[in-house]
Amino acid sequence: MNDFWNDLVSNPAITEALWPALGETLQMVGLAGLATVLFGLPLGVVLFVTQPGGLAANRTVNVLLGGVLVNITRSIPYAILMVSLIPFTRWIVGTSIGPIAASVSLTIASVPFFARLVETSLREVHPGKVDAAHAMGSTRAQTVTKVLVPEALPSLVASITTTVVALIGYSAMAGLIGGGGLGRLAYNYGYQRFQPEVMLVVLVILVALVQLVQLVGDAVVRRVDHR
Amino acid sequence: MITVTDLKKVYRQPNREIRALDGVTLSVPADSVHGVIGQSGAGKSTLVRAIALLDRPTSGTVEINGVDLTAVRSAPLRKARRRLGLVFQQANLFDSRTIAGNVAYPLELAGLGGAERAAKAQELLGLVGLGDSGAAYPAQLSGGQRQRVGIARALATDPDVLLCDEPTSALDPATTGEILDLIAALKARLGLAVLIITHEMSVVKRICDSVSLLEAGRLVESGPLVEVVGRFGSRLSELLLALPPTPEPDSAAGVTVEVLDAVSAGAVPALATVGRQFGVDLPVLAGTVESLGGVAFHRQRVLVPSALAVDEVLAALRRHGAQAGRTASGAEAAA
Ligand SMILES: Nc1ncnc2c1ncn2[C@@H]1O[C@H](COP(=O)(O)OP(=O)(O)O)[C@@H](O)[C@H]1O
Ligand SMILES: [Mg+2]
């Protein structure tokens, strides 16, 4: 036990590489999370309003975005997606290495996932509220921004939490092909150099990170939920 | 004043057409309440959605103070909508907004400033008896209170017409009475034309000045409440003065007749007078008395014993101002 503890506090992988790795993971998750909400929320709204009988029903747009784009992206395993996106990433950020580059494939993988969650959240808003918004003379844009999204907010926040937790998992994988971060650290030291204490520390930090995200997410949901 | 003319709504389905509204025409003047009553599937929801332009009617017009809502679209329609307040069965409040925020929503759309909105919302909440609840959220209110908020919200843009879709169907009887009284008071105070769609007879009896019966997308009967109730044998009269079913008596015992008598205050019902005249107590199988518009309507199902001549009894009842007829052979209205 003592030996294990000594390994832990003297191992440079932990004393020196751990904090930068955590920083890289947070950067990947933070960037990708932000971009996912930025692109995924509008996409989810469009999926919802263009569905048959929706606020702006449009079969073509709905099938193209939902049936084709979202479903195809979601059916590609992340490991394959991130590798095949390397040329695209290089074109966008100029490099395929580092946490910023990794955020590109992370975002592309999680936008369709989040958009579907958004669509489901909006579907849970009672249609009578949309009727009420219309009867009072709201435009379609006002119905979305002033009624649908605020009414779905608790569920949207919960969806963001779920997405960020999923991103933490994917970011470990992204680390392997140049993203860096905790995943890379665990792989290099824990797996390749067989230092189980590094593996353990990374595991504990990841678990704590997920718990923290879930805790904060749940607290925000309670705050915005007046139902 | 709201005028609905020849409103039709046809739902086209792959193999058939459903005529949910088949030419509805009605008109409600200011400061009055009109009820449209109909069984499930009659087309009530379709009618509300068509009048409120939530679904475009297939044809026909909806005019508020002479302005045809079906003729305008987009921005002019959104503006014209403010002349019509809509009250829903489930209130349909926004859970993310406070009570005051809900009432202020239509004012926000109308472009009022924050302070103005708050003042107007407070005034409206006072009007519906919820002056202290502005900061609460809908989830904290009872069903009746939520409906009050729904009414305040519908009145926010000072509409001329209040369209109520089953406003009390989700409420218990005591709360129903309170909400209906509130609607009646607001109608008088603001001079509203109120159109209430419902399946509850009690709603019609309590506040309607006039009433229509909706059946398979058509208004099959219509008129001032006192008039339709006094129309012997009419569907509305029988629905509003409902009698429980009674078993068909043995033909040897006698014949059943129905009597409808509008008895003014202090007068003696024709049935009592006629019974005395024939020297028998005519057995009442079922009966109801409903006071509507200052008139007590007596409707009874009576057994005329075989010892008496039915036609003479009926003639005597009519002579004393009642309407009467045999039940089996249907209602033969009389002067
Ligand atoms: N969207 C729709 N598509 C097809 N048929 C409909 C639709 N809405 C209503 N109907 C039909 O129209 C008729 C009237 O329905 P509705 O207005 O809901 O009646 P009510 O509210 O009086 O119960 C029913 O036969 C119903 O099946
Ligand atoms: Mg209905």
Image (cartoon, coloured by chain):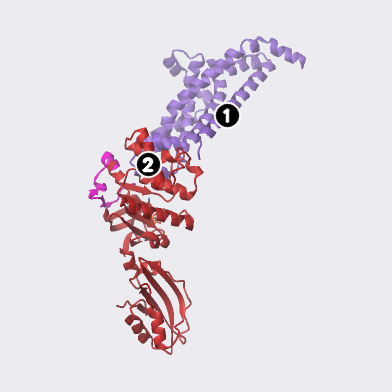
Mark 2 and mark 1: Cα distance apart in space: 33 Å
Left or right: residue A111 compared with residue B113:
right
Can residue B13 be seen by looking at this rendering? no
Quadrant of the frame with the C terminus of chain B: bottom left
Q: Amino acid at mark 1?
A: Gln
Q: Residue furthest bottom?
A: B307
Left or right: residue A215 compared with residue B97:
right
Residue at the image position 52 percent from the left and 33 percent from the top: A223
Q: Residue furthest right?
A: A2
Q: Residue furthest left?
A: B66
Q: Amino acid at mark 2?
A: Ala
Residue A48 against residue A196 in the figure, above or below: below
Chain letter of the purple region = A
Residue A132 % position (x, y): 38, 44
Chain letter of the red region = B
Residue B199 % position (x, y): 41, 59
Q: Quadrant of residue B125?
A: top left
Residue identified by numbered label 2: A133
Q: Nearer the viewer, residue B11 or B89?
A: B89
Residue B251 against residue B168 in the figure, above or below: below
Can residue B140 be seen by looking at this rendering? yes
Residue identified by numbered label 1: A214
> Residues at badges 2 and 1 in contact (C-beta under 8 Å)?
no
Label 1 Cα crowd, 10 Å radius (few <14 / some 14-19 / many 20+):
some
Q: Quadrant of residue B255?
A: bottom left
Q: Is residue B58 magenta?
A: yes
Q: Which residues are magenta?
A: B54-78
Residue B146 % position (x, y): 45, 47
Between label 2 and label 1, give the one nearer the viewer: 2
Residue A174 % position (x, y): 54, 20
